[in-house]
Amino acid sequence: MNANHPKWNFREFSGFLLIIAANADNIVTKEEEEAILEKIDPATYEKLKAEFEACSDEEVIETIMSYKGLYFPTASRKNELMEMVKKEFLSDGHYSQVEKALYIALERIL
């Protein structure tokens, strides 16, 4: 995450997580993109997508962790975010092994 990046609100952060989930298998389907656009507007989607594409894997993890205390400080909030991520994985009707592995990794990070 760029040090000059403004703090994301919850909607933007959750949109970023959904973009990460959609890209787990390196193929973003139309259904996955539509599911994200139900949560965030197209301009925010494009902004967050560009941010994601500019990040290394390490930077993505650091970005997620930097919001840990702010947006998922409790088990209940973490579960809410993880359910949202799982719905994104399932939005194209397929829950691949790569997506399952990312889900487990996100659970550990969060």
Image (spheres, grey):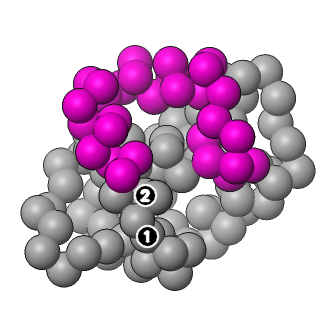
- Please tell me whether residue 32 is drawn above or below residue 106 in the rendered image: above
What residue appears at the point 70 percent right and 40 percent down from the top-left corner?
A: 27
Structural crowding at the residue carrying mark 1, measured as other residues with C-alpha within 10 Å and reported as few (<14), some (14–19) or many (≥20):
some
**Of residues 18 and 56, the one drawn nearer to the viewer in this rendering:** 56
54 on left or right of 91: left
Residue 46: within the magenta?
yes
32 on left or right of 37: right
Residue 49: within the magenta?
yes
Residue occupied by mark 2: 52
Q: Is mark 2 on a helix, strand or loop?
A: helix
Q: Can residue 97 be seen in this view?
A: yes
Alpha carbon separation for disc pair 1 and 2: 5 Å
Q: Give amino acid for label 1.
A: Cys
Q: Can residue 74 be seen in this view?
A: no
Residue 67, located in which quarter of the rendered image?
A: bottom left
Q: Where is residue 10 in the image (x, y as percent from the top left)?
A: 24, 46
Q: Residue furthest right?
A: 97
Q: Is the magenta stretch mostly helix, strand or loop?
A: helix
Residue 36, located in which quarter of the rendered image?
A: top left
Circles 1 and 2: CB distance less than 8 Å?
yes
Quadrant where the image shows the N terminus? bottom left
